[in-house]
Structure formats: C-alpha cells, structure tokens
Image (tube, rainbow, N blue to C red):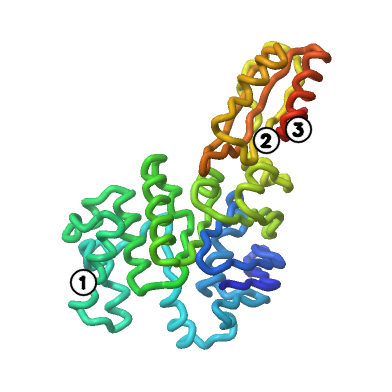
Amino acid sequence: MIEITGLNKTFQTANGPLEVLRDINLTIEDGEIFGIIGLSGAGKSTLVRCINQLERPTTGSVVIDGKDMTKLSDRELLEERRSIGMIFQSFNLLEQRNVLKNVCFPMEISGIGKKEAEKRAMELLDMVKLSDRAKSYPSQLSGGQKQRVAIARAMATRPRYLLCDEATSALDTATTQSILDILREINEKTGVTVIVITHEMKVIDQICDRVAVLDRSRIVEIGEVSKVFTNPQSDIAKELILPQAKGIDIIDEGERIRIVFNGEDSSRPVISNLVLECRVPVNILFADTKVLDGKVYGHMLLQLPDRDRQAERVRNYLDSIGIDYTRED
C-alpha cells in the first residue's frame, strides 16, 4: 500500500519559489490500477517521481508498505526502489544493447547471474509478446515494441509497484490499446500495483479502477472511475470528461440535455424506446459510451425539439425509467 500524506513540493527558480504540489493526500491500495489525470502542468509527473523519491518532497510523507520513503538513507532508498518499476513516455532504452540485454540490465545491477537474468528476461519478453525480437536493437523496433521492452525491463526485478508516466502519450490509438492490455494482464497475473499518469481520460476509463484528478497542484477529485466518469464533480474533471458540442451545426434552438449512463443493461435500447414512446424526434449531438460486463457507462448529449411539451415528455420518460440527465446551457 502507498500512503501519501500532506505532500508538498516547491521548486526554487530564478523568479522565486514555484509550488508544484500542494497538500496531496492519497492512498493507493495493493493490487489496484490507479490513475492520476490532469492537464499539462498540473503536477502529475512530479507526484509520481515523489513516490519513488526521484524528487524529494519539500514536506509530507510517502509511506510504502509501512516504510516512510522520505526518511530513508540513500542506500536504503536504492534498495527500496527495486520494488518499484517505472516506464516513461520516451522509453529510455539503451541503444547499444539488444532487447534481451536491455531487459537484463537492472538484474545485472542487482547482482543476478547472467544465466538466471537471461532466463527471467526471456520469460518477460514472452509476457509482452516480444520473445522473437530478443536479439533486435531499439533502432529496429517500433514505438509500441520499444514500450513493451521498457515494461519488461521495469518488471525484471519483480517489483510490487509499476509507475507509468505518460507511457502511451507518444503512441497511436491501436498501439496504446495493446500496451494497456499488457498492463492489465500483468496486473492480473502478478498482482503488481499499477499507477498510470496521463492527461487522457480514454486511458483512465479503459484500464483504471480508481482515479485522482489533479488541477493546479492539488487533488480536486478522487473516486472509482465509473463514478467519476459518469458524474464528475470538479470543473477540470468535467472539462476532461464532458466534451461540449463544439463544431456541431445545431439547426433548432431546442433544449439540450446530457444523459448519463451509469450501468444500464446494454441490451436496453434507451434512445430508440424514448423516440417510440414519446413520439418525439431527438438529435444526438455527441456520444461517448462504453460497455463493461454487459452494462453501459458514459454520456450522450441530445438536442430536443423547440417545443416545451415535447421536451417535458422526454424528461418525464427519462425520469420514469430511472435515467439520469442534466440540462446543458
């Protein structure tokens, strides 16, 4: 378990002190996939670097499995870092080493014998589906393959925690999905706790169990992904999760409502039934939904006809079937 209490981080700059993190309080449970999301400059990367003490907090504590990382000596900290793997957006592979030797590198530092290290490395490369590229060099790999090597290397010392700092930001959509699938599989097979730092809500809602939202150096919202996704409370979470209908040609001046799907049966045709039952045409301006375990989560922005009675009929119908919605300005 990771327990962060009263954490603050201030950098000294030529223009004076710069507060990057303010009063961060956060608990990350063993075995979960935890997301930290925010816009650029919110403090996400600094927070994750404070977890493994690559950045020393100005004040506050970071307790991992009962040990306060901020109070450890450099030697003790080096030992504890072996239980914390980390992957970055830029991969950070050693260009002069082939894939196998890249994965072996942290084990060499830990004093593990060559034969044992290579056996472990091949097991990891098989796990990330790259065993056939063991003798290749980083320059011969795609971005997605490089990131899979980085994941294998991060898992080499059998860490209990895996920190992912914008690990998919430089990848296309399909490759991002493959990396997220691998992270989920690693979490399920090994029980490693995964912490995902990102500015993309699509990454959070595809893989994470819980999420913390950072804005201007502070945590402004935290909770289960399904709850934050369907009912964001903070302004920044709403900005990240609820895109507005920008660029859409709206013919009428009718009322707009946002329907929230927070676990509806995926076999239930809500919009079709609404149109048939109310006999009212609606215009779908935007939709962002997903199906998890046969249930629908997400949002849909509808434009209703510019007639009060028809709009009221739609609202009454949604109330009667228990669908949450909000009026949009």
Q: Which residue in the structure is indicated by mark 3? A: 326
Q: Which residue in the structure is indicated by mark 2? A: 260
Q: Quadrant of residue 67?
A: bottom right
Which quadrant is home to the N terminus? bottom right
How far apart are the two marked residues, 2 and 1, measured between alpha carbons?
50 Å
Q: Earlier in the sequence, mark 1 or mark 3?
A: 1
Nearest the viewer among 42 and 1 is 1
- In the image: residue 162, left or right of residue 232: left
Label total for image: 3
The picture places residue 215, in percent across and down from the top left corner, at 67, 53
Instruction: Tell me: residue 282, above or below residue 133.
Output: above
Instruction: Tell me: residue 113, above or below residue 100.
Output: below
Is residue 46 among what the camera can see?
A: yes
The picture places residue 72, in percent across and down from the top left corner, at 54, 86
Which residue type does callout 1 highlight?
A: Glu
**Residue sitting at 43 percent across and 50 percent down?**
168
Instruction: Tell me: residue 56, above or below residue 256.
Output: below
**Tag 2–tag 3 contact (CB < 8 Å):** yes
The picture places residue 60, in percent across and down from the top left corner, at 67, 76
Q: Quadrant of residue 128?
A: bottom left
Mark 1, other Cα within 10 Å: few <14 / some 14–19 / many ≥20: some
Q: Which residue in the structure is indicated by mark 1? A: 118
